[in-house]
Amino acid sequence: MAPLSLHLFASISRKNFSAVLWYPDPINLINLDQINLQSMKFFIPILGFIFLTVSAKAQEPEPIPQEDAPIVQIVSNRIYGKLVDENTGKGIGAASVQIYLADTDSLLNGMLTRSNGNFNFSNISTNQNFRLVISAIGYEPYEQTITPVPGKSGRYEKDLGNITLHTAIKQLTGITITATPPALQMGIDRKVFDVSKSLTATGGTAEDVLKNIPSVSVDIDGNVELRNATPQIYVDGRPTILTLDQIPADNIEKVELITNPSAKFDASTSGGIINVVLKKEKRFGLNGIASVSAGTPKVLNGSLSLNLRQGKFNFFTSGGYFQSGGKTKGEAFRENKASGVTKDFFNQYSISNRLRKYRYINFGIDFFMDNRNTISVIQRLGGGNSGTDGNQQQEYLDKDKALLYYGDRDETGDWKSNRNSTRATYKHTFPQEGRELSADITYNYGNATSNSSIINNYFYPDGAVYKPSATVNNNGGGNNDQVTIQTDYVHPMGENAKFEAGIRAYFNDFKSYYNVFGYDNGEEVKLPLSNNYRYKENIDAIYGTYSQKLGTFSFQAGLRAEYSRFDGELIDSSFKFGYQYPKSLGNIWNALFPSLFLTHQVGEKDEIQVNFSRRVRRPNFWQLNPHIEISDPLNIRQGNPQLQPEFINSVELNYSKGFNGGNLLGVLFWRNNPNDITQYSDTITTDQYKQMQNAAVDPNAILNTWVNASTTNRYGAELTLQYKTDAGIDITPTMNFQYRKVNAHINNMDLSNEGFNWNARLTANYKIQTDNKVLHNLSFQVMGSYESPRVIPQGKRLSQSGVDLAIRKDILKKNRGTITLGINDLFNSRRWGTIYDTETFYQDSYRRWNVRTFRLTFSYRFGKADFKLLNNNRGGGERQDD
């Protein structure tokens, strides 16, 4: 069969888009199941683009609807537009819209907007300029100068687009009216966390923010879990190469949690989505915020953010420096066994010091071409380095726990990186409310280098040398390039229905080297552990969803199709590994991901929803790479190139109930994971130890790898309550209950396990309102959490708990200044522990931060609404894009 060949011919004009897809040899289409899926990755996005763009007709003007009908049928010399609220985006009815002659200030015409915010003026003269004046109760006034320019036909028709009105802020004498939304806004399908309300994270990083969010946990290495599963983490809705500790908390506006994403989102979000939304100011004039933090251990942070909004442009920039230290402590106690009989014991005590530094600068521009079209470009530049030095004491004991010999291991290392990102976005809004087209391209790129040195000495109990020292030096580096291209289209179909569609292409190119050197008879030799690898990843997707409301019932049905390919290579050995899904149309089901959401409005404040989605979890590079990683001589890691993706079926039942002073969200969930990617641990073999005998690795080290389990099922319930007491205390308790059952058999070993676990979190806030100037506006926040032990294959994770505390005081005129004192892990109790119990070993280990973190942060907000870079006020025209 000839290869699939596609040719796209397209012509684009201001009013329409036309395209023709041509296949030169239609006879070959008969054998569809033999089509090479390598070509399908191009076919899916192209087909989606044609369908989406033809539907959009992004630049085609259309009449403004009056509810469901046009206001007028006249098309000669007219202007029209729509007033919308800045917060809700909904139309503003009964607002006054008037037209004056710009030169004489004479009133020509006026009207009140329709209930949906539409207005229209016809029979407009093109011989003079006009001034549009808009006023509405509760909103700031708006003016715009209009210069009519007739078209080629001699007619003039101007679509002013959606004109956003800003809420008027008024303060009555002696009375202050405030409406403060809660820190956690709970919806039926997602939770939104307002980071400005997280006092304990002030001056910290995104890791500190996520620790405060219900259902989310962060371990000592920064690994994140959502309901005990690994979520997909985005920044502004797109993939990122930034780590969480490289994102300052003060730069984050909000965090969105979606536990069961619909077909609109990436299929690889099997563990849910955590979307970190960064701040981006758009208010008129010059606005900014400066902050500085200091604390222990070795905390020193500073940042400055600025934005300038004038006329059609919004300029924004931010920059900062972040530094933090820390000391980790770990202990491990192992019993080695043979056929169930104890052979010997091994104990390990570790302590490590770390110092991290990170610098960044972001800048960008929004260009408001008109009220319907916006182009945005943003550039992020960042780089940092970290250094570690640690010591490890090792004890080797016989079966009676008598000391045979001991080891002393010293390790130093440093790491440097550059993380950059460029993003361009275009957005077009149509006259029809809610209809819009957006497109963006994101390019993430960066590099990193690392160096480390390990020296392990061994001694008899009397101090005599047991065996020669083992010395290992390594160095490495890598480059990473990611490109994401995405287009989304939203088309309302009447007041109660909506169609959404989009296409997405993701490309990831990663290349790295890792050199390991040991010593043999005093000479440095390169060890087989050295690695030089590269991988390329590509995911192409198209999706469509349809939603409709029928009385008190509503539904959303969607389908997503994805083609994915992963090609990895160990360059020195030419060993290749990876996957391609689907490989042919015969297993096309592996590329389809449906979702269905059914919602019933029970009362004014009550909703119940059941939803289903099918997702995929693809193995990442480290889970596939057969290279052995030896940073810990007791616990080493190796990937499994035979790993296959796992497909997840997820069902949720949500109930949301509102009441005076609060809201309750209850969730029942079930997740079924065939081929679950599961960690598997066993002691290294004799051949493996010989390969690593010059690498300071213990002969009884545990090798951690990954396998595909038969199935994993999770059943759970989650309860989240928001309540404000009469005393003004806001409390948000959350409880999560889960039962997990794993079925797995590897190498004639039964790794199956099951068990129940639960966790709870309580966040409480209180703000003093009094006539005492010292105590007034003094805020307190306390957050406590507990996680019970939970099962894993071959063992369990131990319980953990902790408490964070913060105090904030607003100061200076108009409360422009803020001082915040935050204490993380108030009782120094957080620790992450694991127990493994297998036929060959039993191990009890834990790691923890050895000191609390104290941070004192001062922030200052400033701004001038009437600031102008260029004083070119032309009759109020600079506000036409407000």
Image (cartoon, rainbow, N blue to C red):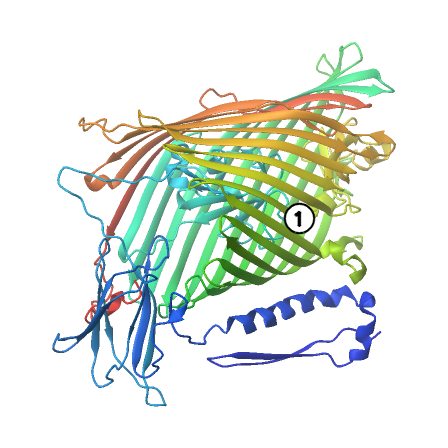
Residue drawn at 49 percent across, 60 percent down: 422
Query: Up-down: is 454 above or below 869?
Result: above
Q: Is residue 240 visible?
A: no
Residue drawn at 48 percent across, 57 percent down: 496
Residue 526 point in image, percent of width and height: 75, 44
Residue that numbered label 1 is attached to: 615
Q: Report the quarter where the C terminus lies.
A: bottom left
Residue 336 point in image, percent of width and height: 79, 20
List the single residue furthest toward the bottom.
Answer: 153
Residue 543 point in image, percent of width and height: 61, 60
Residue drawn at 76 percent across, 47 percent down: 644
Q: Looking at the image, how many numbered discs can be counted on the residues?
A: 1
Indicate the quadrant where residue 779 lies. Answer: top left
Indicate the quadrant where residue 223 lies. Answer: top right
> What residue type is disc 1 on?
Arg
Q: Residue 818 vs residue 501: left or right?
A: left
Describe the element under mark 1 as helix, strand or loop: strand
Closer to the camera, 318 or 206? 206
Q: Report the quarter where the N terminus lies.
A: bottom right
Q: Residue 675 vs residue 86: left or right?
A: right
Residue drawn at 21 percent across, 41 percent down: 814
Query: Up-down: is 671 above or below 95?
Result: above
Q: Is residue 279 visible?
A: yes
Q: Residue 271 vs residue 554: left or right?
A: right
Query: Up-down: is 393 above or below 672?
Result: above
Closer to the camera, 708 or 622? 708
Residue 782 point in image, percent of width and height: 40, 26
List the single residue furthest toward the front.
Answer: 551
